[in-house]
Amino acid sequence: MNNPLSDRINKLSTSQTLAMAALARELKSQGKDIISLSLGEPDFNTPDFIKEAAKKAIDENYSTYSPVDGYMDLKEAICRKFKRDNDLEYKPSNVVVSTGAKQSLYNIAQVMLNDGDEVILPAPYWVSYYEIVKMAGGIPVEVPTTIESDFKITPEQLEKAITPKTKMIWYSSPCNPSGSVFNREELTALSNVILKQKQDIYVVSDEIYEHINFSGTFCSIASIPGMFERTITVNGVAKAFAMTGWRIGYIGASEIIAKACTKMQGQVTSGANSIAQRATIAAVDADPKVLNEMVSAFKSRRNLVVGLIQEIPGLKINSPEGAFYVFPDVSHYFGKTLKGTEIKDANDFAMYLLSEANVATVTGEAFGNPNCIRFSYATSEELLTEAMRRIKDALA
Ligand code: PMP
Ligand code: GLU
């Protein structure tokens, strides 16, 4: 029989974060002592007050379809959160709740991009942006940044990347995979470039790591004068509230975009999980101070990992200000042979660490930066210390 699959799926790449996590799981199940620093998910449990809200929702029989764009009281709670944390005045009609921020991003691409529209992706970018844009017929335009500039795109670089076909720019701050956080001045300078163009350029601001931020400042680009109408603010509860499996994300956007996302979702998945939506009300209404303990644990892990990586010859690292990733430059090893294995690129380097050190990471190539690899440090200090010891030995 011929290949039954569509060109669309044949052209799609597998998510490399999920693929590496699956490979690490498989090797573990074969009895290998793998330390997985591949998947970006908190190792904490969902806070009890959120679990209680979910249990209550089950008992109260929240068991039917919800409105496609989310329960009204959840959307109102999300508007309070946008006001409280981001100084953004969204109304419930601007909000769409989805099955994870991943679906929010997919909706946006599907409803905003025509074939051939260009989407600027400052690299490194989160792995799925590239494929989600491609699936919608868009053309991802990668703009490389380097560790020397903390992986932040400059206004000059942005200006140079804009063409008459540019429709959007997508970025995350704090950034997955680099951990970089844009401050208000930096976002204002980028906004000025966007606002002076003749064409309308839209921005997807992925703020899912908002609360995992050690920089002391956070800025939503939608709060910069002129940017509100052209920004789609993406957020969710997966990372900050350790709810990756609950699958709730949301957007704040102009009504026309929000309505289109609702139309899209109504044909594909309908409203997100009803119980998880009820639990999310408790999460977004909570004072972010409830996250202090978790955030300070991430900060001390960041310090630990950065310190340990600095001791490994040949790895270049900066000190990221947020999320729970470090993204060292490993290009020193390209072209070298380690214990009989030739290291041509970051893919080889990541596979070498997996086979020689039993440590799973993700190649930077997945994020549009072929010189780096990503470590997720969302695991215990003990495992992180052991992982770095193994890596140091494997590279000695
Ligand atoms: N954006 C970024 C930058 C992420 O790291 C993730 C995490 N996988 C997502 C979006 C998707 O989040 P969710 O789990 O809510 O779909
Ligand atoms: N966002 C996480 C990561 O980058 C989870 C995996 C995924 O959704 O792709 O590792």
Image: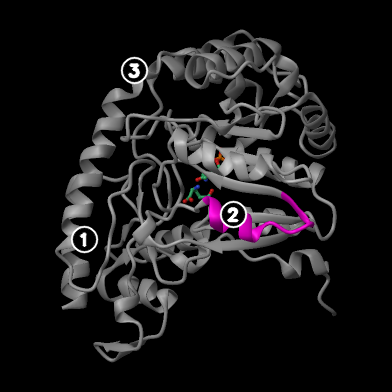
Q: Quadrant of ligand 1?
A: top right
User: Is disc 3 surrounded by few (<14), some (14 to 19) or many (20+) residues within 10 Å?
Assistant: few
Q: Does the magenta stretch include residue 218?
A: no
Residue 173 percent coordinates (x, y): 48, 41
Q: Count the numbered circles shown.
A: 3
> Is residue 267 in view?
yes
User: Mark 3 or mark 2, which has the lower sequence index?
Assistant: 2
Q: Which residue is drawn at 42% across and 55% down?
A: 151
- Which span of residues is magenta-colored? 155-167
Q: Quadrant for residue 380, please give it.
A: top left
Q: In this view, does 72 lie above or below 44?
A: above
Q: Quadrant for residue 280, please give it.
A: top right
Label drawn at residue 4: none
The CA span between labels 1 and 2 is 31 Å
The CA span between labels 3 and 2 is 35 Å
Residue 119 percent coordinates (x, y): 69, 54
Q: Quadrant of the C terminus?
A: bottom left
Asked which secondary structure carries label 3, the reply is: helix
For disc 3, the marked residue is 289
**In this picture, residue 32 sits left or right of residue 38:** left
For disc 2, the marked residue is 158
Residue 83 percent coordinates (x, y): 55, 15
For disc 1, the marked residue is 309
Three-letter amino acid code at the position of disc 2: Leu
Q: Which residue is drawn at 37% across and 30% down?
A: 45
Along the viewing direction, whichever of 215 and 366 lies nearer the viewer: 215
3 and 1 marks in contact (CB < 8 Å): no
Asked which secondary structure carries label 1, the reply is: helix
